[in-house]
Image (cartoon, rainbow, N blue to C red):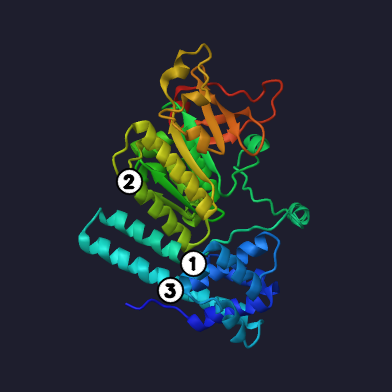
Amino acid sequence: MELPANYEAERSVLGGLLLDPSYLNDVAAVIDDPAAFYDPKHEAIYRAILQIVATGGRPDAVTVTDFLTKSGELGKWQRPTICHELTADVVSPVLAVAHASVIADAAIRRRLAIAGQAIAADAVAGIGRPDELVEKARKLVDESSHRVVLDTGYLFGAVDEIVHELQQGEAQVTRTGWNALNGLIGGLRPGALYIVGARPGVGKTVVGLNLAVKFAGLGSVGFVSLEMSRSELVKRAISAEAGVKLSALIDGRTSIVDMEMINSVKSVVDSWRLSILDNAESLSQILLYARTLHRKGDLKLLVVDYLQLMRGDRKAESRQQEVSEFSRALKLLAKELQIPVVALSQLNRESANRKNNEPLISDLRESGSLEQDADVVILLHREKTKARRLKMIVAKNRQGRQGEVTLNFEGEFCRIVDKPFDPLGVFTVAEDKESTDV
């Protein structure tokens, strides 16, 4: 199979740059990788032009020939006049920019063709599970069409960009719905990984679901549940929105008033773009799910509940290493899709042995590199005697300060709300056993 290439466009671009290197910035914005040139000689000449410019020199037929001679490349080709030949064929240097797009398009077509061969070979050979093959195939296709632009520019104009962003209110952060927490972390940022850790029954799923519902009103949200079914999560979301006790929804003991309250929020719930995946079996399935939602457009958030229940696609040396691979993969996914990823995590029993029972970042179970990969680590704590008070401890914050806030945990309604300003304790709510339901 003959791979796509356009030798005339390659010669035109190189000849144009050798005659007038002022077009290099425009060409480099289109051809970010020298490997886009199919002819190995043309690739080497383009690399030489880039390296000469990077060292402060001016590329032309003479300087590039000298560079290639010293590097030993020119001797291999037995064409000492190749750079002068390229300039002789140029109609106009200005065409270099237009022809650069022709080269870039041909390079994408080549990579797609090669990726297609690899996909077909894997499919025929029957290597791996079908979901793994699909994820690998999509990754190959994405990489084939993705142009990585290496920005080697300096900071000229950077201050103006930041000032404009601040004046226009374009800071990329979405509020969580809890003003007290926003005061510490600002909100959730695209490309960031948030680890929310807690002991069982403290409320990490409630935190994840409340965040998902908040963001589902702004765009699409993916919720990966490795513990609860879709039905269980939907009941919790309806309980929080309608103010109907979760126990009534679970046991089917809803009153006429409860049914009216549930029906009153139907249009709101129907408007949420909340997708729930409750049958993921591996990391590759979770990544495939997130990328599929992203392709559909406007993905705002991914929540994974919870890390320790995830399974890898292959056997790892240790469980700690496997969980570390999960956290690294989720961090890279957040950067790739430019969305915040919230990963819920279980804590070990060490905190139970402390006098105040408060968790520390070292309590992250099978932590490995969890705290390393995370941009923000939030630890949850509720005292048995004060079950309605949920303490969120920001143990790590790459973008700001650490600290803690206390919110009201309404477990019977599966929701968390800001505490009102109450210096005299007027709004203190009596603790009850049902508030521990999650």
Question: Closer to the camera: disc 3 or disc 2?
Answer: 3
The residue singled out by tag 3 in the image is 109
Which is nearer the eye, 385 or 382? 382
Amino acid type, label 2: Ser
Q: Residue furthest top?
A: 355
User: Would you say 118 lies left or right of 264 here?
Assistant: left
Of mark 2 and mark 1, the one earlier in the sequence is 1
Of mark 1 and mark 3, the one earlier in the sequence is 1
Quarter of the image containing the C terminus?
A: top left
User: Would you say 11 lies left or right of 138 here?
Assistant: right
Secondary structure category for the residue under label 2: loop
Q: Count the marks: how many?
A: 3
Above or below, 409 relative to 327: above
Image mark for residue 282: 2
Q: Residue at x 40, y 59 (%)?
A: 139
Crowd tier of the residue under label 2, counting other residues whose Cα lies within 10 Å: few below 14, some 14–19, many 20 or above: some
Q: Residue furthest bottom?
A: 91
Secondary structure category for the residue under label 3: helix
C-alpha span from label 1 to label 3: 13 Å
Which is nearer the eye, 163 or 39? 39
Of mark 3 and mark 2, the one earlier in the sequence is 3
Q: Position of residue 158 (x, y in %)?
A: 74, 54
Amino acid type, label 1: Ala
Above or below, 42 relative to 389: below
Q: Residue at x 78, y 56 (%)?
A: 160
- Which picture quadrant has residue 389? top right
Q: Residue at x 31, y 64 (%)?
A: 118
Which is nearer the eye, 207 or 139? 139
C-alpha span from label 3 to label 2: 31 Å
Q: Position of residue 216 (x, y in %)?
A: 52, 52
The residue singled out by tag 1 in the image is 35
Question: Closer to the camera: disc 2 or disc 1?
Answer: 1
